[in-house]
Image (cartoon, rainbow, N blue to C red):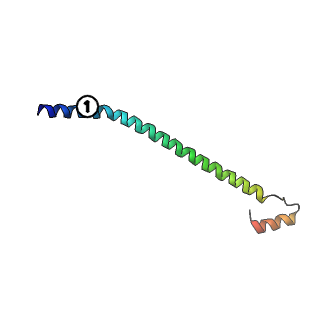
Amino acid sequence: MFLFGKIKNYIITTLALALPIIYVMGKVTGASKEKNKVLKDDLQAQKKTSNFYKAMAEHENTSPSDRRSLIERLRRDGL
């Protein structure tokens, strides 16, 4: 009975000492995953913005020279 009690105490002590280490490793891993997620979101937003400005540049190759062409373009394409 005495031997099993010692083994049980060693296991409990090992787990108690390992718990803070596991906690810190989980925090570090979670922080890095969150940072990667934020960076991916920023990159995606930047790509969307870039694509929007490219589309706007392609759309407005020719600027309207007079009032009539401006009105026709607004009726055709909208704002």
> In the image, what residue occupies the spot 41% across and 36% down?
25
Residue lying furthest left in this view?
1
Dot 1 alpha-carbon crowd within 10 angstroms: few under 14, some 14 to 19, many 20 or more: few
Drawn side of residue 79 relative to residue 5, left or right: right
Drawn side of residue 53 relative to residue 34, left or right: right
**Residue 66 in picture, x, y percent from top left:** 88, 62
In terms of secondary structure, where does tag 1 sit?
A: helix
**Residue 47 in picture, x, y percent from top left:** 65, 51
* In front of the other: 38 or 1: 1
> In the image, what residue occupies the spot 49% across and 43% down?
33
Q: Quadrant of residue 54?
A: bottom right
Quadrant the N terminus occupies? top left
**Residue 74 in picture, x, y percent from top left:** 78, 65
Task: Inspect the image, locate mark 1, and give the three-letter code of the amino acid beneath it.
Answer: Thr
* Residue bearing the label numbered 1: 13
Q: How many marks?
A: 1
Quadrant the C terminus occupies? bottom right
* In front of the other: 25 or 62: 25
Drawn side of residue 40 relative to residue 67, left or right: left
> In the image, what residue occupies the spot 81% across and 58% down?
61
Relative to 2, residue 31 above or below: below
* In front of the other: 78 or 33: 33
Residue lying furthest front in this view?
3
Relative to 6, residue 44 above or below: below
**Residue 39 in picture, x, y percent from top left:** 57, 44
Relative to 7, residue 69 above or below: below
> In the image, what residue occupies the spot 77% across and 57% down?
58
Drawn side of residue 45 relative to residue 75, left or right: left
